[in-house]
Image (spheres, grey):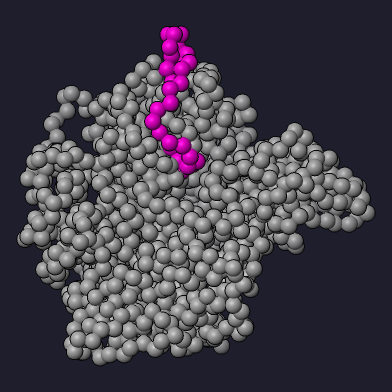
Amino acid sequence: MKKLVSLFSIFVLAATSGMAGEWKTLFDGKSLDGWEGHDKFWSVKDGTIHGQTTAENPTKGNTFLILKGEEVTDFEFVCQVKFGGNNSGVMYRSEVVDQDNFVMKGYQADLHPKHEYFGMLYGEKYGKRGIIAQRGQRVVAKADGSKEVVNVIGDDTKLTDTEWNELRIVAVGNRLLHFVNGQIAMDLTDNHPDAMAKGKIGLQLHGGPPMFVNFKDLKLRHLEGDEAKKVLAEAVAISDKTAKPAAKAAPKGKGKGKGKGKSADAGSGSGSKKNDPNWVKSGEKPKWIWNDGRTEQRLWFRHGFEIPADVKSAKVYTTCDNGATVYLNGKRIGENPDWQFPIHRDGIEKSLKKGGNTIAVAASNKGGVAAFILRIDLETTNGKKLTVTTQPAGWKATKTKPADGWEGAGFDESAWNVKLKSLGEIGTGPWGIPSGSGGAGGGSKPSGGAPAADQITAADGFKVDLLYTVPRDEQGSWVSLTKDPKGRFYASDQGGKGLYRITVSGAKTDVEKIDVDGLSGAQGLEWAFGGLYFHKNGGHLHKLTDTNDDDILDKVEVLPSDTGGGEHGNHAVILTEDEKALYVIGGNHAALPPEDSIARNRIQSWDEDLLLPRQWDARGHARGRLAPGGWVTRFDPEKKTHELVSIGYRNQYDIALNSRGDLFTYDADMEWDLGMPWYRPTRINLVVSGSDYGWRSGSGKWPSYYEDSLPPVVDIGPGCPTGVVTGVGTRFPIRYQDAIFALDWTFGTIYAIHLEVDGAGYTGKAEPWVYGSPLPVTDAEIGDDGNFYFLIGGRNTQSAMYRVSYIGNESTDSAGENAEPEPRKLRIPRATRLALETYHGIDHPHAITNCWHNLSNEDRWIRNAARVAIESQPVERWAEKVITETNPQAKITGAVALARMGNPEKHRAGLTEALLGLDPSSLTDDQKLGLLRAYALTFTRLGKPTRKERLQIIDRLDPLLPSENADVNTELIRVLVYLEAPNVVPKAMKLITDRGETEVPDWTELASRNSRYGGTILKLLENHPPSREINYAFLLRNMRRGWTVDLRREYFEFLNEAAKYAGGASYPGFLANIRAEALGNCNDAERAAVADITGEDFNPKPDFEIQPPKGPGRQWTVAEANAEVGKRQRGRSFENGRNLFHATACGACHRFAGLGGAIGPDLTSVKNKFDRNYLIESIIDPSAVISDQYSSSTVTLKDGKTHTGLVIEEGEQIKVYPPDHTSEPAVVKATDVEKVEPVPVSQMPPALINTLNPDELADLVAYIMSGGNKDDKVFK
């Protein structure tokens, strides 16, 4: 039967494709007959196949024009192609995986503007294969899934994407070759288990930025037998002519090779390359352990174990986030400078002995999650095998630095009492199994020498020189760089090894230590106003000066500033554009400068401004951390005062001014959010006066379209931003002089950000300008010679200094004074923004008159500047102007301002009425987004609407859902959920169930620069979650009404499906928390109906006897309760806490862990949203903050009767639950209701816990904050 099918296939192929060996023309020059694809992207233009996307007509992900009918096996293909704006490609031996959207999977001859990618072989949607072979590589893909570059091939001819180039593909058996303009580009022998033998041909339009591609002269011939052998032999012969051994010659074309880095030496902790670290996950698995400490913490560990005989052989694997030094029986066996670089060594048997042995560890954390892991495997001379692993029990730890000799076997650690917990087994969490192997970008080499210059890739015409390799043990790992008026550089170790002055003269580099009161650890350096400004990691802003003119800094002055924050703390300091002050910045864990030092605040009002409840990070990062997030101030060196300029960043490390004097920064992502809708990639931001870029912790990050925020200049992708420097002063081509350079530590890349003026702001493109593997870049500076100097290092990794110079043929003259004046259309918008910014943070009599008309400006940057100027004026001067404004955009912008600055009693009702006066159906999508944000801010800042207003707003907004604009859908759902609109659930669920193709970001090239971090990203790209629909589900999770059983089932089925996708470290936790909250808001019938999907054995009635409290109680205050509970954070009773939840009547209204009533909110997920203090305050003073969903109201009927309690609308009826939970609800007809008025008193009684003694209160709080988890640490 198989033979019959095969013969039939051959017959069909011959009948439709022509005989083997005959060329077939695939395009007639007039029509797309024989091809299929989206009509809106593909057409015939000037006798070519023309594909194009625009900003107005983008493609959601890559899409293809597919050759109909036939498939190819062995073949030869040629075409002419030119393209621009993004990369394209020709698919072959590929399959169609989404016919509706014309999506393909398989081999792609990549057409890419970058030299090393033009003509390469890329695996489109091809699992982990990604870039299979770059241009200039002959590769053998092996049966075990690995690959080897065996030769360097081809030439270094520069190819221009926007000009016609010939692409030729030869594929015979497992040998695939690509040619560009007759020159070999790629040669692969594919023995990979997933190699594709046959499939379809397609032409690519790439998702992302707008692009075009043109194809012509497309021809195909099928090959078989001797002819196939002949064509292949001729193609291989061309490849052979240029082949060089890969170990001796690297691909050219960037002026540098891409050679591999050397492995780190054993003493650095990397160990032997022959050891595969995967052995640590077999047998007895070690656990990641730590205590509950936060950032900037040190712990010392000890663990004793017995060995029954002499040791024959032993090996160790250990690492720590962020670093550790490890001892065996007092002997140092290694140090890991960061978690990616484990100590992984054979041959440690000499450090072990028969009898008692001791492991001692000095471990430290420098920000974020902390954990330590270790495993030792040994074999004794009598053949017995033993394993020693980290576990929470059996290991001792202390936070206090121990006395001398703590590393040795005889030390007494009995007083060490830090409680340890497990963060998961090896292979879990954000760490996986760190290998310390090459192929990474940032930080992949702790020591053993810095990467040689020929291991670093630079853009055409640029040369990289290694100037100085930092001796790590003596001078540390350098993370900040500046220069003085004499052109000498200053660099600082991240830790405690000091400040250094570097003099570069040609090929000679001299380094001297500058010891000024032992200062070290700068994350910001700037020479200005006669001294060196030094912003210390975790410390203050200092000024260092030379008091005796001996050219040595000798005096330290501490300036107004604050401390703390670690790697998310105090960062860069630079000279302002007018050279009269300094810009100073801090990350999202850095405290603002002291309040009495802030002379002017350009941001008048900030808050979380989240309409619906937030979820904190599922792994606890930045829990409780509130606005303003990262900040920028302007520091006056004479008055020693600050102006707060901008806020809302996550962790921007550095800033720089461009040639126009505008300020830019490179902000960090939260990589654990990958896959979630609130993930924000690393991005370049324009730092303007009064701006709030909307970083809020956990799920609270603002979308960039919010009217009270601003968009990024360019999104880059995952990474770890470090230095930012201007191209001003370089002796580079003019486009680089006008660029901003941004450094990414993780992916070892320096981006040249090419800016384009966009009104009063900018857009930009990020060019990977210099990169290496490894190349953990930290900071950069422009030398007096016009060259670019940069550092690598950080987190105690190997540090070095490099220079990039231009050796190309383009002019390096600066525009200078003879430059043409900037065109008026470019100059005026920026001048307008700057003029508006002069009113920020000051009360000015002409501000309203001069700024008001710009509230309607189409330019967001101008409109934002006008709004901030208005907000800076007393609100009573302009509130009425918002109400009476007739221009829709001005009214929306003014409404945002009034919501932020207004008084609830004076302005809420009038502002709500004014917003209702706008017809949303007549607005543009951007205006609709502004209107929805104005509503949200009105509700959060000024108060919830009345019932009448609520119904009016629902009537206005409900018809708009769904919209063709996905962002509008998101905000409509957000606001309508808040308003409890009856139709929002079915409409949102339809968007979820009928979702289209997920937009997948174009990060494949970026991921290729770091095999370790990049692997996670590639998994995400191959299996990207439906992030937008997850956001819809997130917004719906607190909606209690409007559901049917079928909709509930669809909802939880979607969450189960979403859990199968890849994501960041917090992705599964966020989904679990969404699911838990949504379950908590189901009624009893719904929970029972979805039990087969959720796996929940649901019965809300307690199956244990409820015992009354023992007391004696007291009249608890918030302060007393917090103090008593704070003393009792361990050893609590799960059973007693659960009993007290029901004994104090909490369970009469609230469900928890599946048990209790359903009138009030389910409290199971409280731990994901609030801290202990909030919980205690809510119990003792429940009326302080009342959720809109559960606040009491007075219902007045048309006959004058009233009912007070929790109001729940159910169709044509309204139920009013009285405060007494034992009473039945009053049921009235909706048509009998005259009005519903909110009551500022909670439904919940305020004295429920006054019968409890301190231990009982601690048990109750522990039970609630554990989420009902009896294995929580608080019960141990």
1124 and 1041: which is toward the camera = 1124
Along the viewing direction, whichever of 1234 and 1210 lies nearer the viewer: 1234
In this view of the protein, can residue 789 be seen by the observer? no
Relative to 348, say whether 1051 is above or below: below
Does the magenta portion include 37?
no
In the rendered image, which quarter is residue 343 located in? top right
Task: Quarter of the image for the C terminus: give it.
Answer: bottom right
- Taking the image as shown, residue 555 lies to the left or right of residue 470, namely left
**Residue 1169 figure quarter:** bottom left
Q: Position of residue 706 (x, y in %)?
A: 26, 57
Q: At x 10% / y 46%, what residue is drawn?
A: 848
Of residues 333 and 693, the one drawn nearer to the viewer in this rendering? 693
Which is nearer the eye, 368 or 149? 368
Write down the region rendered in magenta.
544-570
Q: Is residue 287 visible?
A: yes
In the rendered image, residue 550 lying in the magenta stretch gets the answer yes
At horizontal 33% and vertical 88% (from top left) the residue drawn is: 1226
The percent coordinates of residue 698 (x first, y second) are 43, 58
Q: Residue at x 18, y 84 (%)?
A: 1234
In the image, residue 965 sits, relative to residue 866, either above or below, namely below
Q: Position of residue 147 (x, y in %)?
A: 58, 54
Give the position of the N terminus as an image quadrant: bottom right
Q: Residue at x 59, y 74 (%)?
A: 1109
Q: Position of residue 544 (x, y in %)?
A: 43, 21
Q: Is residue 982 above or below residue 1240?
A: below
